């Protein structure tokens, strides 16, 4: 049975940006997804964050290409994007109060906690703040 993981947007960005210091690790994560060793989940906000980062770092055309790839992976069942609703919003807000994370990180942590899945992130601050709430798999280059 595959291990359930929740992928932070940092993992997606690193996989798509050539020269990113975590790219090799990101590609190993996705290899496990494609080989069904990992069952991958992401918050529905993940693709929004990824597209924004890629557009800033590599341009709009590259971000549009990444969006199409993410849509394809989701339609093929490689990634499940978990919808955001009122209950999840309230739980994420409680986590935000407890963890004091950056931006939308509490939403991603909420998905990991709800799924009882490991959080995979290359964001060391997010990893540190999330430990004790969820299992965290973080990587150093």
Image: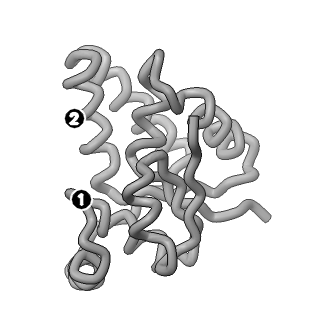
- Is 105 placed left or right of 97 in the picture? right
Q: Is residue 49 left or right of residue 118?
A: left
Place residue 13 in its image quadrant.
top left
The kind of secondary structure element at disc 2 is helix
Q: Which residue is mark 1?
A: 102
**Res 52 label:** 2
Nearer to us in this view, 101 or 107 = 101
- In this rendering, the answer to whether 34 lies above or below 121 is above
Name the quadrant of the N terminus. bottom right
Residue 124, horizontal then vertical, whole percent? 44, 52
Tell which of 141 and 52 is nearer to you. Answer: 141
Please, is residue 55 above or below residue 9 in the view? above
Q: CA distance from mark 1 to mark 2?
A: 16 Å
Residue at (58%, 66%) from the top-left corner? 118
The answer to whether one can see residue 81 in this image is no
Disc 2 crowd, CA 10 A, few/some/many (<14, 14-19, 20+): some
Which residue is at 70% across, 63% downward?
3
Residue 65 location (% of width, % of height) = 35, 21
**Mark 1 / mark 2, whichever is N-terminal:** 2
Mark drawn on residue 26: none
């Amino acid at each position: 049975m595959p291990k359930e993981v929740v992928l932070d947007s940092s993992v997606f960005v690193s996989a798509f940006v050539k020269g990113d210091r975590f790219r090799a690790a990101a590609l190993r994560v996705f290899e496990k997804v494609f080989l069904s060793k990992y069952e991958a989940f992401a918050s529905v906000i993940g693709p929004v964050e990824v597209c924004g980062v890629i557009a800033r770092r590599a341009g709009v055309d590259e971000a549009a290409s990444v969006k199409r790839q993410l849509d394809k992976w989701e339609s093929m069942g490689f990634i499940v994007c978990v919808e955001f609703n009122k209950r999840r919003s309230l739980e994420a807000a409680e986590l935000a109060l407890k963890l004091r994370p950056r931006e939308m990180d509490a939403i991603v942590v909420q998905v990991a906690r709800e799924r009882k899945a490991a959080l995979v992130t290359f964001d060391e601050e997010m990893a540190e703040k999330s430990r004790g709430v969820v299992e965290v798999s973080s990587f150093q280059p």
